[in-house]
Amino acid sequence: MLFLFSAHFSSLMLKQLVTMEVIHWANLWEMYKDEFENEKNLLGGSLGPKAAEDLKLRIIEHNILVVSKYYSRITLKRLSELLCLSLQ
């Protein structure tokens, strides 16, 4: 999915995604939620919850790549904490 956001939002998001550090989803969402909500009706169509879920999945994918780079062994409990997911 292509996200079309303001230049400021895009540059901040890009900086976080190219940095090989775990991105805590709750913190990221809290920081960018208002801007995301303002941009979701771009081009006349609502991006809605699907776009937010796609973004969350992309952040999880990024975090899996980061974790795989730095950990050779990790418990499921710790992995779920880093990915901001429950064990279920």
Image (cartoon, grey):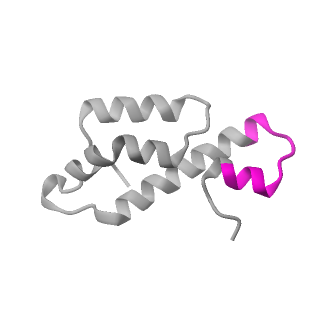
**Residue 5 picture location, percent across and down:** 26, 42
Residue 44 falls left or right of residue 70: left
Extreme-bottom residue of the structure: 88
Dominant secondary structure, magenta = helix
Q: Is residue 4 visible?
A: no
- 49, above or below 69, in the image: below
The residue at the point 12 percent across, 59 percent down is 44
Magenta residues (range): 68-81
Q: Is residue 14 magenta?
A: no
At x 33% / y 48%, what residue is drawn? Answer: 33
Between 38 and 54, the residue placed more toward the observer is: 38
Direction from residue 10 to residue 65 in the image, left or right: right
Q: Position of residue 46 (x, y in %)?
A: 21, 63
The residue shown at (31%, 35%) is: 9
Could you tell me residue 76's position as x and y percent? 79, 57
Which quarter of the rendering shows the C terminus? bottom right
Q: Does residue 80 show up?
A: yes
Q: Nearer the viewer, residue 6 or 84?
A: 84
What residue is rendered at 50% in x and 35% in y? 17
Report the quarter where the N terminus lies.
Answer: bottom left
| Residue 8 percent coordinates (x, y) | 28, 29
* Left/right of residue 77 with respect to residue 25 in the rendered view: right
Q: Is residue 75 magenta?
A: yes
